[in-house]
Image (tube, helix red, strand yellow):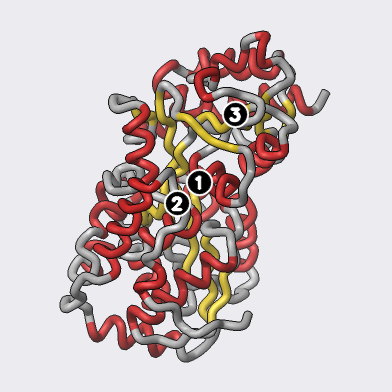
Amino acid sequence: MNHREVTSTAALSQPRHMFGNSLARSAAALCAALSFGAFAADNAALVAKAKEEGSKGKFLVMVSSPKGEGAQRALMEAFQKRFDMKLDWEWLPLNSGVSAPRMLEQAKANVRLPSAIGGYPYTVYESWIAKNGLDAQVDWVGDFSGMFPSIKAAAVDGVLPKYQKRMLRQWDVQYVMVYNTKQVKRADVPVSIEALTQAQWKGRFAMSNNNAAPLEFIALEKGEAAVADLARRLVDNQPRFKAGPPAVVGAIATGEVAVGVAGYTALAEAQKAKGAPVDWAPLETLPIQPLLSFMLKDAPQPTLGKLFLAWLSTEGLAIQEKEEFLSFYSNKESPTTRAIQAARPNIKVLEVSNDKDLETATRAEAEVMKVISGAVGK
């Protein structure tokens, strides 16, 4: 990978198209606030150790998003500039379903592991990483609150209690109704997943064949049985099955279908930025899937990895959102959050907030996937 000269922080603060001019100004203000603050509380010894580790080999990042090389470069260049480093780095944006089994096999074979990893929901982390003893304990707040005062939001407020001192919240998948603007008028956009079971949408919507989202989060409100029934009725309405949410939104962008299940804000905005006839509208409720980062127990550059992930979930947030529209819904200054709340000021968030919720969502996901797998297999 050829690394360009480090991009100036000021350049990174210039917003791209994002939900209109007023919200673009919000993104710029957020970038400026995070980019030009004082960093007097930096832990000099920790930064020095991270630099030392970085000089001893390639820094491998395996975080699923951002996907694009340009966004990855913008983040890595800003990180290096922030801490006066020069790294030989590589970023593999593998999703958790691919990276988790790969990490287990690499650990068994004593193959070099990535020094920073992320893009995981709780369920994949628990079943592949934690249960196999691959995760490391990190006192994120104790180690980094002096450097990154906002880290409590990512390390404590945004993480289930049993995963604190282990995981960091990187960004939120915010599920909405994505639609093709040439096929559907804004006023006619369905406001619920339930609406897609109606005859008018028969064969006109896409659905993931390898992902239950966001139905498992709807189960937090309606229950597992109701969501399993909803999945059956969706399948009966002849969706176009696609291999994951990106493919669902891709089918909407090309006009193959008018709307879709599993679309989310970041995917829709990425398509809009490319000029596709795509937009999105909030549903009656807002299902959210947090994606989280963590450290592996035998990471080859543990201090550098921890520093990068802590920075990514704090100071790096503005760059993530500017480049690929990745954000925290709880961040009231986020253009995504502002757009959702402007459309639905009192929207109810559906998110796993305790162990019982996680168990419900996990069971609901399994039931939904049984329905989908049975339909796809016919």
* Residue 313 point in image, percent of width and height: 35, 60
Q: Mark 3 points at which residue?
A: 261
Identify the residue shown where x is 30% and y is 83%.
47
* Residue 368 point in image, percent of width and height: 60, 25
In this picture, residue 312 sits left or right of residue 188: left
Residue 334 appears in the rendering: yes
Identify the residue shown where x is 67% and y is 9%.
199
Q: Say which amino acid is labelled 2.
A: Leu
In this picture, residue 133 sits left or right of residue 98: left
Q: Which of marks 2 and 3 is nearer the N terminus?
A: 3
Q: Earlier in the sequence, mark 1 or mark 3?
A: 3
Identify the residue shown where x is 31% and y is 54%.
154
Secondary structure type for disc 2: loop
* Residue 24 point in image, percent of width and height: 37, 51
In this picture, residue 208 sits left or right of residue 86: right
Q: Do the residues labelled 2 and 1 touch (CB within 8 Å)?
A: yes
On the image, which quarter does residue 348 sit in?
Answer: top left
In-front residue for pair 346/15: 15
Q: How far separated are the C-alphas under marks 2 and 1?
A: 6 Å
* Residue 270 point in image, percent of width and height: 56, 49
Q: Say which amino acid is labelled 1.
A: Ala
Q: Earlier in the sequence, mark 2 or mark 1?
A: 1
On the image, which quarter does residue 310 sit in?
Answer: bottom left
In-front residue for pair 158/328: 328
Q: Mark 1 points at which residue?
A: 266
Secondary structure type for disc 1: helix
Q: Mark 2 points at which residue?
A: 326
Q: Say which amino acid is labelled 3.
A: Val
In the rendered view, tell whether residue 196 sits above or below residue 42: above
Secondary structure type for disc 3: loop
In-front residue for pair 236/140: 236
